[in-house]
Image (tube, rainbow, N blue to C red):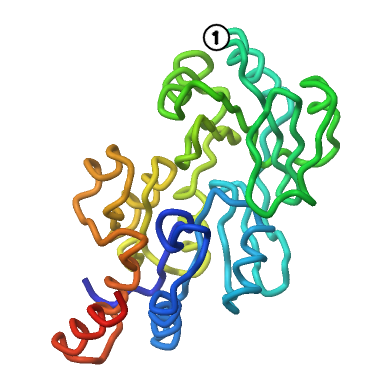
Amino acid sequence: MNRPRLIATDLDGTLLRRGGTLSERTLRALRGAVDAGAEVVLVTARPPRFVDMLAAATGMVGTAVCSNGALVYDIASRTVIETRSLPLPAARQVATALSDATPGLGFAVETGHQVLYEPGFGLRFPGGADTEVAVASLLDLWLTDVPITKLLAWSAQLDADFLLALAEASVGGVAQFTHSGGRGLLEISAPGVSKAGTLSALCAARGIDSSEVVAFGDMPNDLTILQWAGTGYAMANAHPTVLSAVPRHTASNEDDGVALILEQLFSEASPARRTRSRSHDR
């Protein structure tokens, strides 16, 4: 492909290594792409507060599509510039239907700035202790007066693929269901909200066609952008459904798969030099 105008990349399992770290090689590749005129947009299930931590550690700026498309976030100013929230009645309907179908689920509400969780929600997020707020019961989740960017459903026994199929069968159409690989974690957004939907609107506002976008991802919530972008790459460590649905693959996140492609697209070095550089950095 020609050099893209925009790079859309997931974070966990894609751009970042284990522990949420960004390798020096990948950071160089991103900076090289920006120096060559491309825009980098982070497209993630993560909330803005996680993007802030990444930006503080790496100096990254620009735009992030957060919470699976529910938020558009300006990293430099730490400002949410667009919100597509899940209506409270829909959140309650989904929680009731899933609880009836599978007793024992726990629920939490993500607001973009905090996550409110009821006693049955046993999952905790890295680095989130100061932004995680316990409430006394499921009913107390519906008392929040801030927009719900995501409803989270969690099971200690059931995997995310099972929960996704269950939600679609039980209450499909009421909300958008996906997952990003979290163990037993289902992510629920407003109807029609997806990474690709928000990214495509952002690109349209910039006059960028999908053919001018290269995208990277590893989980079912990334499928929409990988299939919408002119060129989409599944990571070698991607979920089986992603690997089978996306024809182009790159190396794993641990092996700097995003950097590998960006070096090919933007580096002025010769192929032999790039090969030596990849071998050295690995």
Could you say whether the residue bearing mark 1 is in a helix, strand or loop?
Answer: helix
Q: x%, y% of residue 112?
A: 71, 49
- Neighbours of disc 1 within 10 Å: few (<14), some (14-19), many (20+): some
Q: Residue at x 85, y 37 (%)?
A: 145
Residue 240 picture location, percent across and down: 27, 39
Q: Is residue 131 left or right of residue 209?
A: right
Q: Residue at coordinates 45% horizontally, 15% vertically from top-left?
A: 169
Q: How many marks?
A: 1
Position above or below: 165 against 244: above
In what quadrant of the picture does the C terminus appear?
A: bottom left
Residue 123 position (above or below residue 166): below
Q: Quadrant of the N terminus?
A: bottom left
Q: Residue 179: x, y in percent?
A: 48, 37
The image quadrant of residue 92 is top right
Q: Can you say whether 97 is above or below 7 in the image?
A: above
Q: Which residue is mark 1?
A: 101
Q: Could you tell me which residue is drawn at 60 percent across and 35 percent down?
A: 190
Q: Nearer the viewer, residue 195 or 270?
A: 270
Q: In the visual, does 18 lie left or right of 112?
A: left
Q: Mark 1 belongs to which amino acid?
A: Ala
| Image position of 273 (left or right of 130) | left
Comparing 216 with 81, the one in front is 216
Q: Tell me where residue 154 appears, x and y as whole percent.
A: 59, 28
Furthest-left residue in this view: 272
